[in-house]
Amino acid sequence: MSIRADRLFIPSDWKRWIAVNLLGGSPPDELKNILVREGFEEELARLEVDTAANHPYLEAGRSYARKTAKRDWVLHTQRISQREFWPAEVEHRSGLTGEEFRERYCGCNRPVIVTDAISHWPALSLWNEDYLRQRGQGCAVQIQANRESNPDYEESKDRHRSSCEFGEFISRVFQGGTSNDVYMTASNSSANKEILSRLSDDFEAPEPYADASTGGGRTFLWIGPKGTFTPLHHDLTNNFMAQVHGRKRVRLISPANLPLVYNNRHCFSDLRIDEIDSQKHPLFRDVQIYNVILEPGELLFLPVGWWHDVLALDVSITITMTNIYGTNDFTAFYQTQGEI
Ligand SMILES: O=C(O)CCC(=O)C(=O)O
């Protein structure tokens, strides 16, 4: 029997595989057997796995793995307390003072829906198809387009940027039926200052939680048809979602679930909550999900680090804001941002 040339030594990708699995706690014998099944000589497999298992480099890695496991334990204790003592649903509150908001929600990294903070906004009654077309006449805007052609539309958002006239876009949103193909999102905001400014008399910062004087550049428009879907991710700021038109379903998962949500890329997860394969993603079964239907006139506080996916149940317009009082730049000390 001839042995493949690439099986005469252990290549770097297999060495990495050995290290990752040893650090993850796999028994060395199991790894040797897999290597043999993959065509490596038994003696070579044994030598490589034993050398790796006893190597000081790997011992240093094990010490990091133990520290990570300890942090996972801390998060586990938080999951237990949250399940035991937090309300089973995201609370709806009215008459919430700024002080109580900060003490009970923002300061505790806990979501809340405020039902009377934006209900007076003129936008709630004014923003229909005719009004928006008229206010935005001739205004060039940027949107995300052709999203349905690419399952990775969110992470490859730069490839989906497209320009059009605001009125044309609004007609497509209101007349085009259910679709995830077009969506004006926060990532288009730097190109959409003009339209935001034309509409800015119709809404304001929700005092006493957000600082109107710092709203510029921290206020974002999300406009899309029924059916737009923002996949599971977390934000790097505390965030308000102000629902102006239509309803949205928002599913929320506390950051204490970080070890269970398969966060393999930046602030994204590969998971689609409706299509979980329990063989591939067994950890997800212990995740607690809060389901919210956000109605027009409601303001959702979405704390930093909370995982969420968002589906538009109707033609939907949302304004998100990050000008919330208190520290809201958490990236300044996020040294590994974007590296996983
Ligand atoms: O409304 C949406 O589709 C997504 C909003 C969102 O995920 C966010 O603001 O972080």
Image (tube, grey):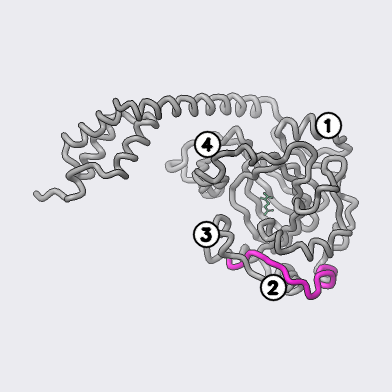
Neighbour tally class for label 1: few under 14, some 14-19, many 20 plus, Cα within 10 Å: few
Find residue 164 and name its label. Answer: 2
Q: Secondary structure at mark 2?
A: strand
Q: CA distance from mark 2 to mark 1?
A: 43 Å
Q: CA distance from mark 3 to mark 1?
A: 41 Å
Neighbour tally class for label 4: few under 14, some 14-19, many 20 plus, Cα within 10 Å: some
- Tell me which label, 2 or 3, sits earlier in the chain: 3
The part of the chain drawn in magenta is 131-146
Q: Determine which quarter of the picture holds residue 71.
A: top right
Q: Is residue 198 left or right of residue 15?
A: right
- Could you tell me if residue 284 is visible in this image? yes
In the image, residue 37 lies at what x, y percent?
22, 42
Residue matched to label 3: 151
Q: CA distance from mark 3 to mark 4?
A: 22 Å
Question: What's the amino acid at mark 3?
Answer: Pro
Find residue 260 and name its label. Answer: 4
